[in-house]
Image (cartoon, grey):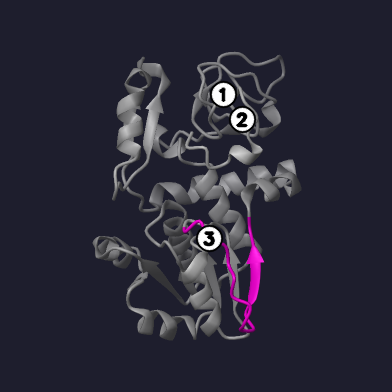
């Protein structure tokens, strides 16, 4: 919608990569039934009232997961889950950048549940401190460079969503045994640090998806559905489709906590 991915978007196109839908028709012998809630994934163009998809990649939503939670159950949760599987965290010290973001919040909470020894989160605003502490994540303001460097010097894994100067600073002090996983560039600037001996790895969900078998895809969501209901997340706001201007304005508000969800059933 913002044009951030214009280099790989061919227009005209229907927007949307995630969302929650309901099966209205399924072929004979299908594992899905009319009325069942699903995530209509791997087809693109989810922001429309009807979409025809291969049921292989449709993700059934369990009754215990409510609509607002399910609608946010794809990109951030799957990104977090796949990274935690690729880079095991049990017994390790972690650092998160953009720690107040949805994906980093999931990473931190699930890492602790999977046995991480500690999780520290770098944030820009002190308003997020209490929420991180409540989740068991040690908050560090990005203006406190001394503390940031001290904690990083003893970290095993860094999950970085920022890039640019912050990532370069971390790389300059990380121990040689540590790994920095770059999964986002919120700063708009890439890593440029070449000094230091820490390992740098990159993760992009769109590159990981083609490597997933159907069994691995379904297993990942089985675990996501188990963890999401007990994971702390900012509340989502549901806005009717007819009020899309209000939704766009709300999504652009500085300091906005939760996600804005367009409701196609309400107009």
Q: Which mark is residue 44?
A: 2
Magenta stretch, residue numbers: 187-203
Mark earlier in primary sequence (1, 3): 1
Tell me the CA gap for discs 1 and 2: 8 Å
Residue at (45, 33) in percent of width and height = 63
Mark earlier in primary sequence (2, 3): 2
- Reading the image, the residue beneath label 1 is 14
Mark 1 vs mark 3, foreground winner is 3
Tell me the CA gap for discs 2 and 3: 27 Å
SS at circle 2:
loop
Residue at (52, 84) in percent of width and height = 173
SS at circle 3:
loop
- Check if residue 209 falls in the magenta segment: no
Quarter occupied by residue 157: bottom right
CB atoms of marks 2 and 3 within 8 Å: no
- Reading the image, the residue beneath label 3 is 189
Quarter occupied by residue 82: bottom right
- Check if residue 189 falls in the magenta segment: yes
């Amino acid at each position: 919608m913002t044009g951030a991915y214009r280099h790989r978007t061919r227009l005209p196109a229907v927007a949307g990569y995630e969302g929650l839908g309901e099966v209205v028709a399924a072929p004979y012998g299908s594992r899905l039934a009319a009325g069942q809630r699903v995530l209509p994934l791997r087809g693109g163009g989810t922001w429309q009232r009807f979409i025809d998809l291969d049921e292989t990649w449709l993700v059934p939503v369990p009754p215990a997961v409510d609509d607002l939670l399910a609608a946010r159950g794809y990109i951030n949760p799957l990104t977090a889950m796949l990274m935690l599987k690729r880079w095991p965290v049990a017994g390790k010290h972690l650092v998160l950048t953009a720690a107040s973001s949805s994906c980093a919040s999931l990473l931190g909470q699930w890492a602790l549940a999977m046995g991480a020894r500690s999780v520290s989160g770098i944030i820009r605003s002190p308003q997020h401190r209490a929420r991180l502490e409540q989740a068991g994540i040690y908050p560090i303001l990005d203006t406190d460079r001394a503390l940031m460097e001290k904690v990083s010097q003893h970290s095993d894994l860094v999950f970085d969503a920022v890039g640019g100067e912050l990532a370069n600073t971390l790389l300059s002090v990380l121990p040689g045994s540590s790994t920095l996983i770059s999964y986002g560039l919120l700063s708009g600037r890439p890593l440029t640090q070449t000094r230091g001996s820490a390992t740098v790895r990159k993760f992009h969900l769109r590159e990981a998806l083609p490597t997933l078998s159907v069994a691995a895809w379904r297993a990942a969501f089985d675990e996501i559905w188990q963890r999401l209901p007990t994971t702390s997340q900012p509340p989502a706001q549901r806005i009717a489709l007819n009020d899309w201007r209000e939704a766009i304005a709300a999504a652009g508000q500085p300091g906005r906590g939760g996600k804005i969800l367009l409701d196609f059933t309400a107009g």
